[in-house]
Image: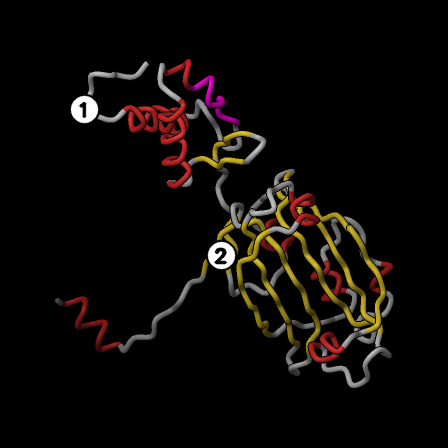
Amino acid sequence: MLDNSSKVNLYEQLKLAIKNDILNGIYKEGDRLPNEKQLCEQYGVSRITVRRAIKELAKEGLIEVKHGKGTFVSKEKLSIKILDLGGYAENLVSKNRSFLSKVLEKKLINADDHLCNIFKMKTKGSSKVLELTRLIIDEGEPLGIDIAYFPLNIYPGIHEKIHDNTSTFNLIQKDYGIVMAKAYKEFSVVTAQSDYSKLLDCTPSEPLFFIKKVIYDPHEIPVHYSLNYILASRVKYVINVDIPYEQGAEKKAITQ
């Protein structure tokens, strides 16, 4: 029970009580919290008080409210380096996470104007490209949708080599000898449309990171093009920047 005689607001007391339970491991990452009615009965407060406390905890990122499902203790977000060339497998496996990829669709298509422009193809419609759509699963839960394109003139027979949990980056490097030299990435935020929200088990209003990526070999030839839709609640993108300095300036800063 909370202290009604305290100068501290009830919602702040409730917020602190739930926060302490999370920090002390009573509620662990991914655990579902008691619902509003249960919290009202447990702490002897109104629904308004419970909702205010939950709202404040959600702002702090400690909990996540999933509409129609309940309130859950937030999981630690996966950190992905913006400058990395690697794909999902390389980023997730390197962090000892349980990673799976499920092939939703793979089909051979004729390159349209957009793909011809991306891959610098001369003739529209005469070049075949593999369009691969996969569901990316991290720690047993949907993380994102990956749509990748592979020109068959660079990767003959690649559609026969890709199955669930195939690392396409390992495949194109080891089987096709492709060397990745640089990448262009474009980031934006979109909301999950109905078809994607079903695959990602989220609401249609859920924010997604949308990343367009083109990878080039050492000769400036585009060798990989992908579109990624990733749950913003599950990841964070980071970048480390080295700031150049003069040796004299460093010495001056140290002696001050």
- Residue under label 1: 7
> Residue drawn 72% across and 77% down?
119
Q: Earlier in the sequence, mark 2 or mark 1?
A: 1
The magenta stretch spans which residues? 32-39
Graded by Cα atoms within 10 Å as few (under 14), some (14 to 19) or many (20 or more), the crowding at tag 1 reads: few
> Residue drawn 37% across and 40% down?
60
- Relative placement, left or right, of 176 versus 92 is right
Image quadrant containing the C terminus: bottom left
Image quadrant containing the N terminus: top left
Tell me, for residue 53, which label it has, or none: none
Farthest residue, direction bottom: 122
> Residue drawn 51% across and 62% down?
82
* Residue 57, percent from left and from top: 38, 35
Q: Is residue 147 above or below residue 60?
A: below
Q: Is residue 227 above or below residue 244?
A: above
Q: SS class of the residue under badge 1?
A: loop
Q: Amino acid at mark 2?
A: Tyr
Disc 2 vs disc 1: which is toward the camera? 1
* Residue 24, percent from left and from top: 39, 25
Q: Is residue 11 above or below residue 104?
A: above
Which of 107 and 198 lies nearest the eye of the viewer?
198
Tell me, for residue 237, which label it has, or none: 2
Q: Amino acid at mark 1?
A: Lys
